Amino acid sequence: MTELGTLDIRNVKKRFKVAGEAFAAIDDLSLTVEPGEFLSLVGPSGCGKSTLLRLVSGLDGDYGGEILLGGKRVSGTSLRRGLIFQEPRLFPWLNVEGNIALALENATLSAEQKRASIAEHVSLVGLRGFEKAYPRQLSGGMAQRAAIARGLVNRPALLLLDEPFGALDALTRTHMQRELEHIWKTEGITMVLVTHDVDEAIYLGDRVVVMAPRPGRISKIVDVGIGRPRDRASPAFTWLKAEVLEALGETHAS
Amino acid sequence: MSRTEKYLGSGVVFPLLLLLAWDLSVRFGLLDARLWASPEAVAATAREQLGDGSLLTALGASLRRDALGLLGGSLIGLILGGALGTVRLIDELLSPLLNGLKHIALFTWIPLMSIWLGNGETAKVTFIALAVFLPVMLNTYEGVRSVDPRFLEVARILKLSRLQTLRKVVLPAAAPSIATGLHLALIYGWLATIGAEYLFAVAPGIGSSIMEGREQFRMDLVLLGMAIIGGVGFLLNTAARRLQAHVLRWQDPN
């Protein structure tokens, strides 16, 4: 299932009606994400980055242009495209195991294979020993790990992350970023991360796409090109941060 | 405060004092023994009726009616409430009518019901089912309709079919509300059972034995019936509360 494909976003336009008036959430946006790449999207609120993610996930449709994964037009949701939300959105009536198992409801695996896959992903996100815990018993970070395991268990070719660590404290967040990087390396999945956090975008991304609002569009693409694991205190990192912040500042000024 | 102290302190002591006051008042002629059978007389009647089996026959008949009405009314309430909550067209077609009907007091149905269904078991069970149906339907409808749309998005991301979404997401999410409806149904059902026995033709039942006591001017029979109705109601309610807490144990305890 982990057969990778290029994500090709071509001239995508998305309009919303707000109070009877149409406004362009995304205007003529084109972007190519290579198989196995980690792409970060940053931008101020209202620049359409979450909208773009929802279009790629197939949750929202009705857009102009084309979104292709491995040459095939995206239509509806698919197990090949996972989506992690800002809130864990675990089902409170299921324990950690049950939540992950629900993702495998339609997988063509035997019961034994499912059990093995669930156990493997529980360990991958570091939740061993918490399989039977209910969401209300988990901390924010642990709940988000469970959500990530649920998003990965179908071995999607593409994992979309919509500010997944936005609600976590700084320490947990740094820790989760390291773990996400580790998962990305071991699983070889293409990842697209939407974030407000410039540090996070540079730490994780092969490229950082800076977006601008009204209408939502790409204002700059920054190649990160620093070896991993990255040192946030290094001069190269600081320099890139300045570059991204400057691009973001321009989008604010305009 | 220890558990025992709490029980003694709040629940049991005061009723026991009342019982004592009642007993003494009858004994010393403060209350007319014809209007107020003594606790002793009630206990004697209880022993006698237990001995000749008439008490259990009456209780069995009442509980059987209650169970049949509950089953029928709840089933119809669940199905209709679920359909109204999930299918927009059914909601638009039926909701105004049902919202109007719920304002017609339950007891006003009795003349029609006795003409249509006679005065026998069918009428009684139908009356109980009608009393039960409304709270089950309304709470099921409310529960199904107010499922967090974010959970439904997760279901789409996980590619759950309509049936899977209904079984694995909508029903568990609506379960607390459905449980509330069923709990109310249990209480209303027992009330309606006694009501039905008062209002339709006499047949064995706890309500009927109270009527019998009134006609024969036997207050011991009336009071015994009341005590049993209260006891059964209390037991049903306690059992329902325990079951509810167990089934919904995933919920936050507060």
Image (cartoon, rainbow, N blue to C red):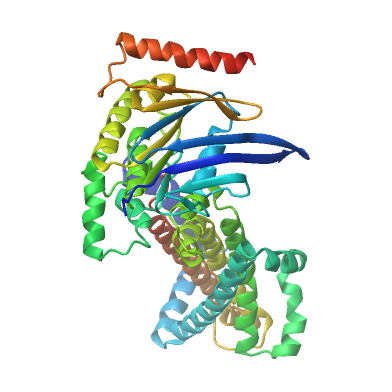
- Which residue does the image show at 48% across and 14% down from the upper left? A245
In this view, the residue in front, A172 or B67, is A172
In the image, residue A97 sits, relative to residue A88, either above or below, namely below
As drawn, is A157 to the left or to the right of B165?
Answer: left
- Which residue does the image show at 46% across and 17% down from the upper left? A244
Question: Seen from this angle, which residue lies furthest top?
Answer: A235
Q: Quadrant of residue B94?
A: bottom right
In this view, the residue in front, B36 or A39, is A39
- Which residue does the image show at 25% across and 34% down from the upper left? A182
Where's residue B167, x and y in %?
46, 64
In this view, the residue in front, B18 or A65, is A65
Where does the N terminus of chain A fall, quadrant-wise? bottom left
Is residue B35 among what the camera can see?
A: no
Where's residue B160, x and y in %?
45, 60
Where does the C terminus of chain A fall, quadrant-wise? top right
Where's residue A70, x and y in %?
42, 49
In the image, residue A73 sits, relative to residue A42, either above or below, namely below
Q: Quadrant of residue A124?
A: top left
- Which residue does the image show at 29% across and 11% down from the upper left? A234
Is residue A8 among what the camera can see?
A: yes
In the image, residue B229 sits, relative to residue B58, either above or below, namely above
In this view, the residue in front, B14 or A64, is A64
Count of numbered badges drawn on the protein = 0
